[in-house]
Amino acid sequence: MMTIARVETETPARTMGQLCKHFGHRIPTSHDERQGRIEFTEALCELEAQEGTLVLRLTATDEAVMARMQKVVADHLLRFAFRDPPQVVWQPA
């Protein structure tokens, strides 16, 4: 099961880097200027920095895990973008 959120932000690559570095203290992550990957135990979040947009693709094993991980990723993203908080809306892929 996969969901996608397209988050408008002036700094998509920076925000992606912050998320990956933050989670990277505890779980496997990787990123470059355009793409990122966060490997949670029960889910995978793939990130893509586009012009003015950070695309989040979240894959999880079931609905309960998906709901929990959507909240975790969105909450952390909002912490890093507190000056201009974006709207994170997850859609089925």
Image (tube, grey):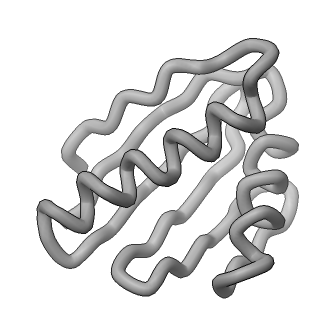
Is 7 on the left or on the right of 70, as rendered? right
On screen, residue 14 above or below 86: below
On screen, residue 34 above or below 41: above
Residue 89 found in image quarter? top left
Is 88 on the left or on the right of 83, as rendered? left
Q: Position of residue 55 (x, y in %)?
A: 54, 43
Question: Residue most toward the left?
Answer: 63
Q: Which residue: 14% across, 71% down?
A: 62
On screen, residue 57 above or below 32: above
On screen, residue 35 above or below 41: above
Numbered circles on residues, count: 0
Q: From the viewer's side, name the closer residue of 24 and 14.
A: 24
Q: Which residue: 16% across, 63% down?
A: 64
Is 23 on the left or on the right of 47, as rendered? right
- The N terminus, quarter of image: bottom left
Is 19 on the left or on the right of 77, as rendered? right
Residue 83 found in image quarter? top right
Q: Position of residue 26 (x, y in %)?
A: 70, 82
Q: Position of residue 65 (x, y in %)?
A: 24, 67
Q: From the viewer's side, name the closer residue of 3 and 52.
A: 3
Q: Position of residue 72 (x, y in %)?
A: 47, 53
Q: Which residue: 69% across, 65% down?
A: 36
